[in-house]
Image (cartoon, rainbow, N blue to C red):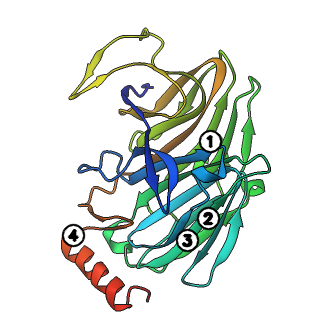
Amino acid sequence: MSIRPVRRVIDAQPTMEGAGVRLHRAFGFGEKNEYDPFLLFDDFRGDHPSDYSAGFPWHPHRGIETITYVLAGTVDHADSLGNQGQLGAGDVQWMTSGRGILHHEMPQGDPMGRMHGFQLWANLPSQLKMSAPRYQDVPSAAIPEIHEDDGTVVRVVCGEFWGQRGPVDGISADPQYLDVWVPPGKRRTLPMDTRRSAFAYVFEGGGSFRDASQPYGVLEEVEDDVVVRQAVGNRNLVQFGRGDEVTVTAGEHGIRFLLVSGKPIEEPVAWYGPIVMNTKQELQQAITELRNGSFIR
């Protein structure tokens, strides 16, 4: 068994999206797709409606999947195919945009004005980029929770973990999407398929992802990268190297994080905002269709 080393720790950066939603972006719109098959990860949260109420008005998607996970507040959504609904705390929406869809998402706070959620973009392989759009709306109650004797809790949104399978299925990258809580001072080792690229995103508490032999503060060369620090906390993204286990030690306040992995697609990526294809020619075709009204098929 081999513990995955920490390749780097990234601070999610504040940015503005939609019509004026304040959020933190851990990665996205880079020249290199270092998180293949994943393209973008946003953490949107706020304690005041002015942080998020402007929402994400009508916009197109093609060639990707968007995964929205809500922790607090609600998100009203609708699309060009006539679908509409609301995501509440603990709910997940896994949308396969395929050949094209227009939709909008409008966050609303809980009774205390708080809103918190995540959006992850996953790439589609070339043979599925023009497939029919598909929704998987998953209520919180349908997501299995695993409770360990030491207090560790794992919600399995997608993939199989410790004998439980998440409700989202039929995803080409065969991803695993877990919401993990480890109590204060506990150390857990989580199995991981060596073929997958993987990252963890910490959003409560703190701790470390490391081999027990690695002391804090060590600078360690890992190919072209340097492990800057081993201790992590709120809004830190941890990118892992290869291995078949992830080891985490919770700090004094415990640690809660998303653990996400998927099989790399290893295809060229061409970006135009929320449209992701393989070539510039395909992007130009999508733009032309948006302008002449033939984008939705």
The image position of residue 256, as x and y in percent, is 62, 32
Q: Residue at x 45, y 26 (%)?
A: 1
Q: Amino acid at mark 4?
A: Thr
Q: Are marks 2 and 3 in contact (CB under 8 Å)?
A: yes
Q: Which residue is mark 1?
A: 179
Which mark sits nearer the N-terminus, 1 or 4? Answer: 1
Q: Which residue is mark 3?
A: 104
Quick one: SS at disc 2? Answer: strand
Which mark sits nearer the N-terminus, 4 or 3? Answer: 3
Which mark sits nearer the N-terminus, 1 or 2? Answer: 2
Quadrant of the drawing holding the C terminus: bottom left
Q: Residue at x 40, y 52 (%)?
A: 38
Q: Amino acid at mark 1?
A: Asp
Quick one: SS at disc 1? Answer: strand
Q: Which mark is residue 106?
A: 2
Marks 4 and 3, how far apart at CA: 26 Å
Q: Badge 1 local density, few (<14 within 10 Å), some, or many (20+)?
A: some
Q: Amino acid at mark 2?
A: Met
Q: Which mark is residue 279?
A: 4
Marks 3 and 1, how far apart at CA: 25 Å
Q: Residue at x 36, y 50 (%)?
A: 28
Of 284 and 45, nearer the camera is 45
Q: For the residues carrying marks 2 and 4, which lies nearer the camera in this image? A: 2
Horizontal side of residue 29 vs 268, given as left or right? right
The reply to whether residue 86 is in sight is yes
The image position of residue 117, as x and y in percent, is 61, 50
The reply to whether residue 196 is in sight is no
